[in-house]
Amino acid sequence: MIAPRLTAEAISLQIGDALILDAISHAFSPGKITALLGPNGAGKSSLLACLAGLRNADTGQAMLGDAPLLALDRRARARAIGFLPQVADVHWDIDVETLVGLGRFAHAQGWGMSAGDRHAIADAMLRTDVTRFAGRVVNTLSGGERARVLLARVLAGQPQWLLADEPLASLDPAHQLDVLALLRETADAGTGVILVVHDLGQALRIADEVVLLRAGHRVAAGACAEVLTVATIARAYGVTVEMGTTPDGTRFIVPATRLAALVA
Amino acid sequence: MSATRLNLLLIVGLAGAMALSLIAGKVWLPIDPFVGFGQGDDPRWLIIAELRAPRTLLAMILGAGLGLSGAAMQGFLRNPLADPGLFGVSSGASLGAVLSLYFGFAGFPLVLPAFALLGAVMTMLALALLAGRSGSLILFALAGIILSSVTGSMTALAISLAPTPFAVSEIITWLMGALTDRSWNDVWLALPLTLLGAGLIALTARALDVLTLGEPAARSMGVDLARMQWLVIVGVGLCVGAAVASAGVIGFVGLMVPHMVRRVVGGRPSATLLPSALGGALLLLLADTLVRALPTVSELRLGIAMSMLGGPFFLWLLFSLRRQLP
């Protein structure tokens, strides 16, 4: 299954006097992992919120296929686009299976769960390796377990697009690798994945395509290897980096020095 | 224990409490007038049919409405300390009722309940306008606090400016809340309003569950927060407005019952709705039976009895929360 395209068409967003996004355009590729990169305050999370239909762009719009995202019925939009927020709120003591089941909200027909719902929930829990916690209360889990449960919630909705705001932030290295592998698997199954990422190394490792933002402008966009170069990173982040490849072929980036001249 | 078993248990408890409520009071009735049902010649039957039965039903209707409102408010605000009182609706309804007593209209039938409902409706509208279309938690809570304090101060103003000492004592007695001498008219007023309110709240059940994940996640999952806010405001407003209009201010039901229910059925908001309604009905019915049966000279006011339960409950809550802290 190939998802309809998700496109940003000249999205501009202003909050108060600050221009957060300045005419950002980009066609995101279904079945690929796209990383939104940029220094703090570049507008990554705002762009993701516009793409998820949570924010209204001041000018421009996000399009799903041929339709403006905000013109879609909210439940249809929720079925197409799964959004994993950065803040991992779980306000009540509910068990893991119930929480993952919430992901079926936009699919619900009347009361109760259908066989399809139950299958999607079981599948999402299996893929995120949280099945053994099914009966546990979410607030007793560790940060990493909780992050996987919340990801399972999004996957249970079987979205065509998965938008995640820093899904790796609270994970230890082993679970970071697990989640990266899971995202890769999700993308290979035809789901488009868009991630806000802070760590350049993780972006280099996982992303097929990269959109690099700075202060609301698109600095560069394209295939990961073309965009993440020493020169482009210096332009966006104001740092020099060392890039290399480990003996087993994994590429890495290490920040070296800060370029004082580029500090705006 | 599962939610279904708790509900069954509460229904059985309610049936028992109903029987107790019908026979208990200053005059304890033996079972035999029930046997003569429909004969109409036993004078004790009159006590049951015209005094105890409407009072019993009213206690259940109001208790259910208040318990359900509390569960819906706590789910909507994602705060276990939320209470319909926090919302400003009960103080708005009391202000309406107090004004009708202040101007001496309350002698006419149905004027006081009408004023109370009007007060509830106006507060609801003000709340919706102040909170706006955002569905934001902070704006909503802030608007509720503003409205409670404004209507509360206007009630105090009405008491201090009351034309006669008689009006003052009438207002204060009414504010304490009671189910004494209620008739079938009060039942027919409260029942449809509470049913309508409960129906609106039931529509939000699934969305309340999703809201557990926070506002951005809920919006991304297809919840219409503005619509949900309206349903909660109007639903709670109807239930609380009906309660204040027919019995005055009775606090703490909406706060205590969902807490106790949550310990049994877990935190999922939709699972707490029905047990909270049943539990509220049971709690208010038992409390009302108790104040009626106590051998005091004048009957203890139900509103005061509930507040006297509320204090120790909060104390217990504080200690149990403190134990959980590291």
Image: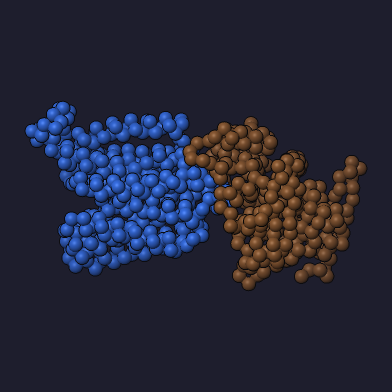
Chain colours: A brown, B blue
Q: Is A122 drawn above or below residue A34 in the view shown?
A: above
Compared with B112, A168 (above or below) is above
State the image coordinates of residue A255 (x, y, percent, origin top left): 83, 56
Q: In the displayed image of the protein, which residue is found farthest to the left?
A: B41
Residue B66, percent from left and from top: 35, 47
- Observer-nearest residue: A62 or B197? A62
Q: Residue furthest right?
A: A247
Query: Residue shown at 30%/47% (left/top)?
Result: B192
Asked whether the viewer can see residue A136, the reply is no
> In the image shown, does A160 or A18 lie closer to the viewer?
A160
Which sits in the foreground, B135 or B106?
Answer: B135
* B265 relative to B175 in the view: left or right: right
Q: Is residue A205 in view?
A: yes
| Front residue (pair A191, A235) | A191
Left or right of residue A11: residue B222: left
The residue positioned 88% from the left and 55% from the top of the image is A242
In the rendered view, tell whether residue A85 sits above or below residue B273: below
Q: Residue drawn at (16%, 44%), measured in percent from left and top?
A: B297
Residue drawn at (42%, 52%) of the image: B231
Residue A147 coordinates in the image, percent (x, y)? 65, 43
> For the C terminus of chain B, which image quadrant?
top right
Q: Position of residue B295 (x, y in %)?
A: 19, 39
Q: Quadrant of residue A68?
A: bottom right
The number of numbered discs placed on residues in the rendered structure image is 0
Farthest front residue? A66
